[in-house]
């Protein structure tokens, strides 16, 4: 049973040194299984645009799509703490536009919080949302919505100036109300330094083991895509093999006339 029910439990988990396990989810079947597990938090990530929809970036994802997937995930996981990603350009135009988008996400999906990418440039948005009682998770390091600006999906914060900016940005997000921060593809020691400098928890992906929690994309950790093997990813199973075998067994049996057998047929 997940221990995290409210944003206060994030702080409690950090203070009690209980690592937070977060995982992405986009569909009902997986949401049900996660709800039965002791995973603490579901992230309906805009990685849905890549892992689920097959795009090469997260940029095409819309607010409508996030609402669609988050509503489905909430149906499968009624008791789990759910964070919904704000897609590209849904929080960039104005505070008013952001509030309208987040209002819809919170009302229509039953999510507990939203997540947005970026540091000081989005501090005012974090503040506006927090004041409107919408809890915000931050996201620093590799921020996939900025892939074109960053020039690829690469480790962030290796240079001294970028390192310093990331440490400052994390503090600025905390000061403006963020209840937790995802650190993606950041050197482990830098992630540890950021974690130490904050009083809210950090959740890492490709950021080493000094964070207060970890997050993985569900399709990646289940091994659905054999072509995707970044250094930070641990595949806990190989569903590509399992599914491939099931599909070929089914096809072979249909063609051989051995499925359906008597036990699958009605009298
Ligand atoms: O969209 C997503 O899945 C994410 C995680 C990789 C943190 O932002």
Image (cartoon, rainbow, N blue to C red):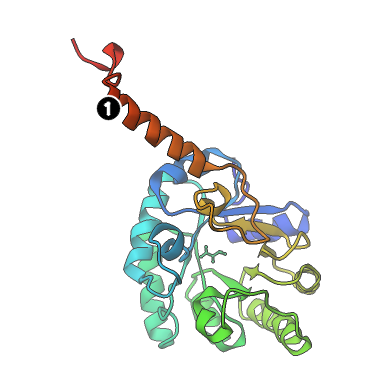
Quadrant holding the C terminus: top left
Question: Residue at image x 56%, y 42%?
Answer: 238
* Local secondary structure at mark 1: helix
Q: Residue 244: x, y in percent?
A: 44, 39
- Left/right placement of residue 232 relative to residue 135 reads right
Q: Residue 23: x, y in percent?
A: 56, 53
Residue highlighted by disc 1: 255
Q: Is residue 154 above or below residue 39?
A: below
Q: Is residue 21 above or below residue 266?
A: below
Q: Residue 126: x, y in percent?
A: 54, 79
Q: Say few, some or many: other residues with alpha carbon within 10 Å of mark 1 (under 14 / 14 to 19 / 20 or more).
A: few
Quarter where residue 140 is shown: bottom right
Quarter where residue 257 is shown: top left
Q: Residue 97: x, y in percent?
A: 37, 83
Q: Is residue 84 visible?
A: yes
- Nearest to the observer: residue 24 or residue 56: 56
- Nearest to the observer: residue 253 or residue 2: 253
In this view, which residue lies farthest toward the front? 256
Question: Residue at image x 32%, y 32%?
Answer: 251
- Nearest to the observer: residue 250 or residue 177: 250
Quadrant holding the N terminus: top right
Q: Is residue 135 above or below residue 5?
A: below
- Left/right placement of residue 225 relative to residue 174 reads left
In this view, which residue lies farthest toward the top? 267
Quarter of the rendered structure image containing ligand 1: bottom right
- Left/right placement of residue 196 relative to residue 252 reads right
């Amino acid at each position: 049973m997940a221990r995290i029910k409210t944003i206060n439990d994030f702080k409690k988990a950090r203070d009690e040194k209980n690592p937070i396990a977060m995982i992405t989810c986009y569909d009902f079947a997986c949401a049900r299984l996660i709800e039965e597990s002791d995973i603490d938090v579901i992230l309906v990530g805009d990685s849905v645009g890549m892992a689920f929809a097959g795009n090469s970036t997260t940029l095409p994802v819309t607010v409508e799509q996030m609402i669609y997937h988050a509503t489905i995930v909430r149906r499968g996981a009624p008791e789990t703490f759910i964070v919904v990603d704000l897609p590209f350009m849904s929080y960039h135009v104005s505070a008013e536009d952001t509030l309208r988008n987040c209002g819809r996400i919170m009302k229509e999906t039953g999510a507990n919080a939203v997540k947005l990418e970026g540091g000081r440039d989005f501090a005012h948005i974090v503040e506006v949302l927090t004041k409107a009682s919408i809890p915000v998770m931050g996201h620093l390091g590799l921020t996939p919505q900025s892939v074109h600006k960053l020039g690829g999906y690469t480790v962030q914060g290796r240079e001294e100036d970028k390192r310093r900016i990331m440490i400052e940005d994390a503090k600025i997000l905390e000061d403006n109300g963020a209840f937790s921060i995802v650190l993606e593809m950041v050197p482990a020691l830098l992630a540890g330094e950021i974690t130490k400098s904050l009083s809210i928890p950090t959740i890492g992906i490709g950021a080493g083991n000094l964070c207060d929690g970890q997050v993985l994309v569900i399709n990646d950790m289940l091994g659905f895509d054999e072509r995707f093997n970044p250094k930070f990813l641990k595949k806990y199973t190989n569903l590509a093999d399992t599914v491939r075998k099931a599909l070929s067994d089914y096809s072979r049996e249909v063609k051989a006339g051995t499925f359906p057998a008597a036990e699958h047929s009605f009298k």
